[in-house]
Image (cartoon, coloured by chain):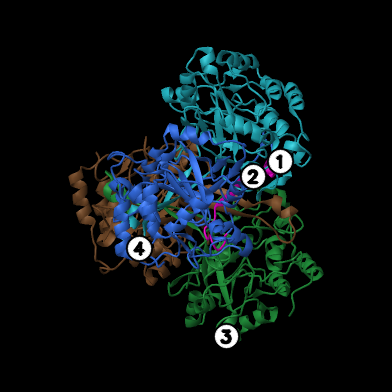
Chain colours: A green, B brown, C cyan, D blue
Amino acid sequence: MPRVSDARAAELFGQSRRWGRWGDDDQRGALNLLTPDRVARAAALVATGEVVSCGRELPVAPAADNPNPALHHMVAAGDIAVRGQGLQASADFFGVAFHGMAVSHIDALCHVFVDGLMWNGIPAAEVTSAGARRNSIAAAFGGIVGRGVLLDIPRVRGVEWLEPAEAIVPDELDAACGAQHVEVEPGDILLVATGRDARRAAYGPWDPNDPGLAGLHAECVPWLVDHDPAVLGSDGVSDVLPADDHAWPIPIHQCLLVGMGVHLLDNLRLDPLAAVCAAHNRWEFLFTVAPLQLARGTGSPVNPIAVF
Amino acid sequence: MPRVSDARAAELFGQSRRWGRWGDDDQRGALNLLTPDRVARAAALVATGEVVSCGRELPVAPAADNPNPALHHMVAAGDIAVRGQGLQASADFFGVAFHGMAVSHIDALCHVFVDGLMWNGIPAAEVTSAGARRNSIAAAFGGIVGRGVLLDIPRVRGVEWLEPAEAIVPDELDAACGAQHVEVEPGDILLVATGRDARRAAYGPWDPNDPGLAGLHAECVPWLVDHDPAVLGSDGVSDVLPADDHAWPIPIHQCLLVGMGVHLLDNLRLDPLAAVCAAHNRWEFLFTVAPLQLARGTGSPVNPIAVF
Amino acid sequence: MPRVSDARAAELFGQSRRWGRWGDDDQRGALNLLTPDRVARAAALVATGEVVSCGRELPVAPAADNPNPALHHMVAAGDIAVRGQGLQASADFFGVAFHGMAVSHIDALCHVFVDGLMWNGIPAAEVTSAGARRNSIAAAFGGIVGRGVLLDIPRVRGVEWLEPAEAIVPDELDAACGAQHVEVEPGDILLVATGRDARRAAYGPWDPNDPGLAGLHAECVPWLVDHDPAVLGSDGVSDVLPADDHAWPIPIHQCLLVGMGVHLLDNLRLDPLAAVCAAHNRWEFLFTVAPLQLARGTGSPVNPIAVF
Amino acid sequence: MPRVSDARAAELFGQSRRWGRWGDDDQRGALNLLTPDRVARAAALVATGEVVSCGRELPVAPAADNPNPALHHMVAAGDIAVRGQGLQASADFFGVAFHGMAVSHIDALCHVFVDGLMWNGIPAAEVTSAGARRNSIAAAFGGIVGRGVLLDIPRVRGVEWLEPAEAIVPDELDAACGAQHVEVEPGDILLVATGRDARRAAYGPWDPNDPGLAGLHAECVPWLVDHDPAVLGSDGVSDVLPADDHAWPIPIHQCLLVGMGVHLLDNLRLDPLAAVCAAHNRWEFLFTVAPLQLARGTGSPVNPIAVF
């Protein structure tokens, strides 16, 4: 299926747009779907008590998928500790521009604009060099807890991984639900695995812009509108890459963040999760995401946690 | 109760030391207590589905309790988005030396040394200017999930908050358990509230070194050994401050991190948690901490999440 | 002399504005005055070969005049060196938001705007979150070399230092020239000493916003237009502080950077320079400023060097 | 000429070592050669007043010779300026681990160790994760001013540039002096051009570790001892690369910094300088280096300035 035209992307965006759904002043978007009732039902899924991290290690060295790694600097190491009087301690500093292609992170609703607007019609000018006054990650400071559902596309296709630039179409999402005997319901935290980790383990890192990353085709937008997730995540960046050089380069980001108010989780590590799901043949679990509380931030690096 | 002498602190440290409990190569310490069985039982506590964050906002401006705030820099703001061709997006960078007195963070087992050694007898020299080769926060990359228990000391004392430098003694921990009808059991994530947030709201920030912070007296160490928590946290830094100018300035840190292998949570925000606990008169809950995955780090800023 | 009104400041700005003087596309402003001929004559001043630094130490700890100090992190210390195989070396990282009140730095012509415009009428919108496309410090990458002239105001007044918030008026500039037997000529690098270092040594650092800093009164603008310096510098920030809460809070910055295209040197260390000048009773010298080459930067920390 | 053996390198190091030459407590090394008399004579060289920068742009994007570029973040851009009340201004932050292969920088005498010692026999343990207590760049805070001499090796060879990994031998240094009619004298700031910029302009950046960089063969050490420069610099890193995998990987660094106490200038931009030298057929000039004043730093990024 070829990439969508600008005209079709604009049409899809129109279908996705539901500004005002939670009031004109809302900045939380689909996080509103994470009602206490849904949280309680998600917690009730816990049976074995297995805990699975879905975060990748923070990259601190440059790599093909990670040209701008995190800084990690010791501000006190053992050398001081042992020599000093009084307290013997170590400490460090880290810094990261986390919206890269190798950092597990959450995108706030201010991360992307369409026609100069973000979720709920708030203007891009609210995001200045002093940070995001509106639609920042503060919307998620309280923590994101809900039912996670994993759709493991390589498993459905019978392959180890999807190749870079391979698109996932809506029928495959339905096929995955069927094969896994799971339904994606409103308010779910939906995770889509493409096997990126397995491919990286086999071949090493590659540039996500060229040859690209596997991900959802833009025509999945209506499916996502219908299934109404609270959050969408992937081991890639949800969108299939490379981006076209037109006005809608990453339509999943554009429609989900801007149109639907759905926070996105990028660059997750989903292989361990998929392994546990497969072992139990259970594709739903309690899922927690805890963004750092950077008041005017455009997102946060995260280490999402699944509990079975 | 006056602060302990060096001799008494060394004695307490001897009592706390249980190196080898999980094998000579262990670097996880008391996180080993977070067995799947305990996790499952913790999840079974969830009833109402209320979600409560226990993290403070990352400070980005200097303050009395926070002389070295986090950096928050926009690497792309709305100005680029609106003017640029193609994708319209914003992004940012943040950096933080998180072992401060105002950042909610977890201390890895390499954070403190006693006589040049850390948990399990590993030498401080394993922590170089290139980071911690052993006892780093990598021990907690998989996520920390368990039963959280809050002891609300101001509530037991009938005050709004403890004053800076006020020490909590072991009897008060027992009194709090009694008043709250909760037992601290092996493998719990134990949180001790001192009312710091309420005092800060009333009077503004103050220097934790002078006049100090309320926290646990060193004589609480045997109580902690007996009750065997997986993790210990506080709205202060667990230790009462100011530190004495001797070899055991922060004995709770020194005994728990080094002797017992217990990770610590510092500078939590516990007022909202205490409010929900009080409303339900229930002081136990599902608790999740998800450190960022900095492989050689001495800890991580965190946003711990309680679920009721 | 009271601070100027908004109306008078606007009038002074009008007098200072000389956009187009070096062509409509010019981004170098008064650096154009540093012709080879003037450089050669400045070098001919050198007699004794004494070298005097006019930079302050980069502050790495918070202080009253420096709430956001520089980061200095070792990325390799002796601990690695001695233990490692192969090369034994140390290295570090530093970072700084240098437009503070305690860092010796140069302001590029993009640092300040008046009515949304900068030097030569270039719009502020040319400075986005991706940096300054025009009027950046790149104008000074080639190095600033010329005749430095120091006016030592405390010496003229017969005091050790000017008090915070004390303004220097045009007559004093003339008086200083007279007392020091020096003329300020077009193309000079003009330095004005207020004794800030001496006061800091006596009393410790203070907040430059309150009680303020000694500096030039706005009525000095016509004097500066007449004398036509290539660069203006001070041990303060040239402007007297605190700033009024009106549209012209720092009129020297606003008129010099925006109207005249004169780069400014802030927070210099001028006491050692003044001492050597006084010893020789010679107030002119070869002066070199070498900004770091940050292509889209708004200035640079610097260590200006005088040679006698 | 093949690379030297470990045994020969150790011998060369022994020849270079002149600890105690300026006293047992000296931390300035060969900067002591920059006497006022030499400075004055250097200034007397100035004739035309041409000013030439020898610094490269600070790299802010990753490249083959620059995997860890500088951070450049706007902390206030035009967007704030225009919208805000009061002062309209822009400002930025930059940070850099400057000991890379693409940043023009000076190495302090603490940058390299031999057998756990640095210049003047000071132990590497003086450089902890808190910075260099001794032999830091503070030795050069006062500014480096002297006679610069450029030896343009490609010109002598009649080529545009030396190829990566090509070594310069002592005879060529003499040949360059002869061809250029210049003598290298004690206390000179000696610059050796390899044509790196021209090759980079033709072919783009390459990895300095593989295929390498042109530079001085270790057998140049005795020549350098004889000629006794105050500072040594290059458009590469003075040493020919790649380094051998033995105990003396960069013998020029090891002998000059540790044995001789000579500060090094790495990654200079020397093509413009060579062009001006050739135009005047004059290979000596006034040369100024002004390190940033980071008290415990291992060096500094610099923008060295030549004046003709």
Residue occupied by mark 4: C86
Whether label 4 touches label 3, CB < 8 Å: no
Q: Residues within 10 Å of mark 1 (few under 14, many from 20)?
A: many
Which residue is at 50% across, 70% downward? A44
Q: Picture coordinates of residue A219 (x, y %)? A: 73, 74
Whether label 2 touches label 1, CB < 8 Å: yes
- SS label for mark 3: loop
Residue occupied by mark 2: C138
Host chain of mark 2: C
Q: Nearer the viewer, mark 3 or mark 1?
A: 1
Residue occupied by mark 3: A159
Say which amino acid is labelled 1: Gln
Q: Picture coordinates of residue A282 (x, y %)? A: 52, 79
Q: Which residues are magenta?
A: D62-82
Q: Do the residues indicated by labels 3 and 1 lie within the same chain of the protein?
A: no
Task: Tell whether position C306 is magenta.
Answer: no
